[in-house]
Amino acid sequence: RNVLWFFAPGYSDFNQNSIDFVNDLTGMKMEKIRLNDYAVQTEAGNFNIRKREESKLEWVLMPLDGDKEWGTFTENNQPALASRIMKDHTSWFCSIPVTSSEVFRFILSNCGVHIYNQSDDAFVEGSGIIMVHTKEGGNRTIRLRNDIEVELDAKPSETIMIDSETGDILRRG
């Protein structure tokens, strides 16, 4: 089991604000830092949140003692995305929300989630069926859990029903 946390989970108990709450929740020790640019680099790509004058974001939390560092702040090369193996789960913490689908797929893949393809299609699986919905359409290669690859030429905004074992197309629309 994996749990993914962003920014400052549990920072407030509605009576007080404390980094200790975040430390307890995530299982990692955090440090509050201020940066000029909230951008993160990973092997899967970079992502950021824009710091605007009207933004109230003055600081972020940096994970200090993760078992594995997956991403760093571009400004200072300090950890921004880390994971820690706990007794009954792996805790993941990212200092800012992930705004890149490539990076999100990278994290999920490292959590053991099956990735059907590298596009931004929506997938739902259950009862022996996979439903894939494409926004833009185009050629797709869908890799099933059993490593069968299904080639599709999808239309924009099309939903396709696939047999999750054989890869047979059951319905399109």
Image (cartoon, rainbow, N blue to C red):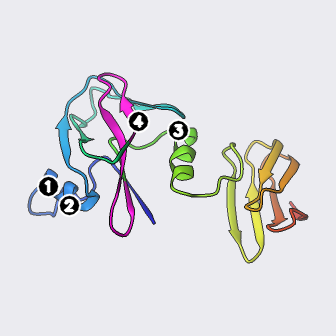
86 in relation to 39, above or below: below
Marks 3 and 2, how far apart in space? 28 Å
Crowdedness near tag 1: few (<14), some (14–19) or many (≥20) residues, C-alpha within 10 Å:
some
Magenta highlight range? 69-91
Marks 1 and 2, how far apart in space? 6 Å
Q: Which mark is residue 100?
A: 3
**Circle 1: element type:** helix
Q: Earlier in the sequence, mark 3 or mark 2?
A: 2
Rendering coords of residue 33 (x, y %): 19, 34
Crowdedness near tag 3: few (<14), some (14–19) or many (≥20) residues, C-alpha within 10 Å:
some
Q: Amino acid at mark 4?
A: Gly
Rendering coords of residue 39 (x, y %): 38, 29
Residue of label 1: 20
Residue of label 4: 71
Nearer the observer, 43 or 40: 43
35 in relation to 163, above or below: above
Q: Earlier in the sequence, mark 3 or mark 4?
A: 4
Residue of label 2: 24
